[in-house]
Image (cartoon, rainbow, N blue to C red):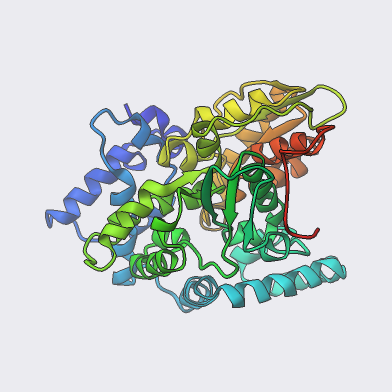
Amino acid sequence: MCLPTCPTYDATRRERNSPRGRISLMRSIADGELEMGEEFAAEMSYCLGCLACQSACPAGVDYARLFETARADIEQQGIRDTPSRIFWRTLVLRVLFMRPRLLRWMGRALHLYQKTGLDRLVRRLGLTRLLPADLRRLEPQTPRIESKFSSDLIAAAEEPATHARCRVALLTGCIQDLAFSSINRDTADVLLANGCSVHTQEWQPCCGSLHAHNGELGMAASLARRMIDLIPPGDYDAIITNAGGCGSHLRHYSTLLAGDHRYADRAKEWDRKVKDIHEWLVDIHPRIPTASPFETETSVTYHDSCHLAHGQKVVSQPRAILKLIPGLRYIELPEASWCCGSAGVYSITQPEQSARLQERKIGHIAGTGALIVATSNPGCHLHIVSGLRAAGINVAVEQPVTLLARAYRREKKPSGSIESTYPS
């Protein structure tokens, strides 16, 4: 039953490119019938890790864990190591995404580079040819970095206008913080509008998702411990995430820290408390806005982030949020849960397959005739924006929670709705 859900099997119709084929390869290696080598590493690199197979599996096979373990084994054996690959993996995984201050400093430098137009000059002069081939392909997709990050927009503690009915911690993410800090502000505003006391730590480490998905489970565990120390789960009713890929990893800390007696129990409590923003809003019954986010009726469709739909099983809630907003006409997207081809660094490691999936997704979005496509993961957001721009299609990409925040802001009588204690 998993085969029809697998984008790589759909592309090749080869058993080895399916989840069933990959599990068979893993079993052969575990049984000593096959050596782990380049061929196996290439196959695991070809897998998107979208987890659509996991949703379809009647036996409940935990493919996510098998996938991460296989990639970790490949990295430990250094099968794909080259000097260039070691350099970039070290820079990204061991340096930048282990140090939030350094990552934010890099973000500010990149913002300045983009704001001054230096990026356009570099392209005009053809200097991007000096970059490695993989980065040269990625350069046009570099996200625009926001001028203000989450800590500039959200205070450490913000209280709703009325009596708080719950206390939540807000996770700001890494790429989300640099490229979509306004979405984090929208998330805080929506939580406030629904009676939540919002607490946001300024310097949050990476959740470890990037490391776990790329075979660095030791660093992922280290980051999980840092996150639990920084945001003790016992202090909050919920820990809110608004990025599908991060959320899927965040709610599996107990698996990652199962052998750590100092953190195992807290990790289980952490997993219970982590909630996607749409899931949390539906749980607490969100207040229906009295205004529309736009002057006229606007059509909207929705793309499921793989790790939100398949990793977290959050499918109906974002749609429910969109449908309760006045003035939005919802149109279901064909193959909404089919991967868009972003899949972390997949567009770098597998550019051709990534481009095929992107083109397929953009075709479906265009076919709906919607003016907005909503999605809830920064990777999907950037990949779809890039695809729409390349195709010359004028469709806006938004987070559902952004549309809800916009509707609240347009209410004529905002008292009792949005109250931010932080100066704008």
Q: What residue appears at the point 24 percent right and 66 percent down from the top-left corner?
A: 260
Count of residue discs: 0
**Residue ranking furthest to the front:** 163
In the picture, the quarter occupied by the C terminus is: bottom right
**Percent position of residue 349, x then y:** 51, 57
User: In the shown orientation, is residue 162 left or right of residue 94?
Assistant: right
In the image, residue 365 above or below residue 271:
above
Report whether 17 appears left or right of 399.
left
328 to 117, vertically: above or below: above
The answer to whether residue 42 is left or right of residue 106 is: left
Residue situated in front as seen by the camera: 2 or 217: 217
Asked if one can make out residue 43 in the rendered structure from this viewpoint, the answer is no
Question: Which quarter of the figure is the N terminus placed in?
Answer: top left
User: In this view of the protein, which residue sits in the foreground, 200 or 20?
Assistant: 200
In the image, residue 197 above or below residue 152:
above
Quadrant of the rendered image containing residue 107: bottom right
Residue 265 image position (x, y, % from top left): 26, 58
Q: Is residue 100 among the parts visible in the rendering?
A: yes
Indicate the position of residue 296 as horizontal and vertical percent values. Answer: 86, 24
Image coords of residue 148 (percent x, y): 75, 64
Relative to 19, say whether 223 is above or below.
Answer: below
**Residue under the image location 25 percent in, 39 percent down:** 61
